[in-house]
Amino acid sequence: MTYSQAIDFLNSLINYERAARPRNQFKLDNIRRLLQLAGNPQESIKKVILIAGTKGKGSVAYMLDAGLRGCGLKTGLFVSPHLVSVRERIQTNGEWVKKADFARLMQRFQPLVRKQPVSYFELLTAMAFDFFARHQVDYAIIEVGMGGRLDATNLSDPAVSVITRIGYDHIKVLGRTLTRIAREKAGIMRPGKPVIIGPQPAEPEKELLTQAAKVGAEPFLVEQHSRVWDIEILPLPGSRNQEPRTGIAFSCFTELGAGRVRLNLLGQHQIENCRTALTVLGILARQDPQLNFARALQGLKELSIPGRCQFLMFPRTGIASPLLIDSCHNPDSGLALARVLKDYFRDKVVLIYGSLRNKLVQKTLDPIVPYVDFALAVAPDSPRALPPSVLKGIFTRLRVPSETAPGLKPALNRARALSFGKMPIVIAGSFYLAGEALTLLNQ
């Protein structure tokens, strides 16, 4: 089987991420039977770290991967959705799965899927389990797709579960209250195993602790196991020739150790994610002497995360204005992006925004609009895209000057003209829009 044939077969499966209507029923029966046909590879993975949450779970997954690799350990990383290539979803030691390996995986699973049909995401989950087991990774970092209790990734056997900040997203599926959403996320907890709980609003924190007690999991609150002070915002490069020295630095005391942390990432929200990752590593270090604070920090220092407040240098984009790409698609993400715009840019920005339907768009945009000079509404490449005309109406209600654009490329050309080569350009909203931007700019 060629890589192209593998992609064709994968794309022939139902893909709820891109379906015109979101999935409203989740069951684990199909993926469980497929894994049984494959010999239950998830049971052969040495140690699994399973991560759920509304905000920050992807960043925490990448940070754990970087920290563990910094300590000399072999890692597997499963994340979703992808931005540029589906191969991003399955990584070992920081590298995407190779095309030939992806094709071999698909060739192994294709006859099994014909016996037991599954969805696009379920097949990729099973393939990741199999790949990590065969490559004997020391740790597999698995990001939950949606929710937790009924997500395909929850058929893994985590040595430690992680729940990042919970907020409002996928409310038609997970519930309209933070308590109900937290209950779904809590489904990844395991009896007798640690669960690291990131900083939370009071309502979901209470529910997570209640569920941990019911399950018999051992909860560790990040805010009780770490402390941060002396935060430094490292400015963006000011000219084409200036060496990039940007991101954040802070001093911290965590479960793993204490010292000065330097991240090449934008946004103070990444401090919370880093505290969570270091707390997880600290809990694991109780039984794994290879985990070391200084080496983990070295790994983190080299980390970049695509599509998360990603700043692109002038020579790489061919655009005179500073350019930022972010997958800001829920209210918590909106608050985080607003803080980034406040911390790093002196001028207001030209915003290119695109969202899927059934998102809390106005609540997401509300904290951002004070920093926006002009907005361009576009449709992400998805059947679930919110029409730009509807998005423009939201900008009008928020009193932001705006217009629609027929696609990202014309929106970017228009943004160039509006920015006069000075105002920053921000592309934000759906992961699909972020991925389209990175592809367009060849990043």
Image (cartoon, grey):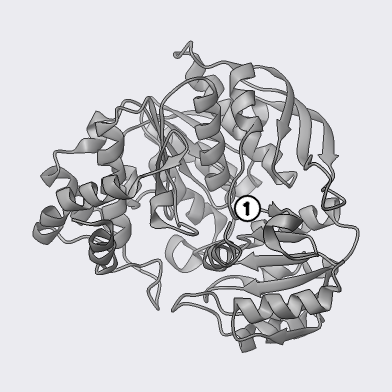
Furthest-top residue in this view: 289
Quadrant containing the N terminus in the rendered view: bottom left
Asked which quadrant contains residue 257, the reply is top right
Q: What element carries label 1?
A: loop
**Label 1 crowd bin: few (<14), some (14–19), many (20+), radius 10 Å:** many
Q: What percent of the width, then of the height, locates residue 54?
A: 55, 52
What residue is shown at x 18% (from left), y 45% (from top)?
35
In the image, is 164 to the left or to the right of 343? Answer: left
User: Identity of the amino acid at label 1?
Assistant: Arg
Taking 277 as reference, is 115 above or below it?
below
Do we see residue 398 in this rendering? Answer: yes
Do we see residue 256 in this rendering? Answer: no
224 vs 437, nearest the viewer: 437
What residue is shown at x 57% (from left), y 47% (from top)?
204
Quadrant containing the C terminus in the rendered view: bottom right
In the image, is 27 to the left or to the right of 292? Answer: left
Q: What percent of the width, then of the height, locates residue 92?
A: 40, 36
Taking 428 as reference, is 63 above or below it?
above
In the image, is 441 to the left or to the right of 51? Answer: right
191 vs 322, nearest the viewer: 322
Which residue position holds label 1? 308
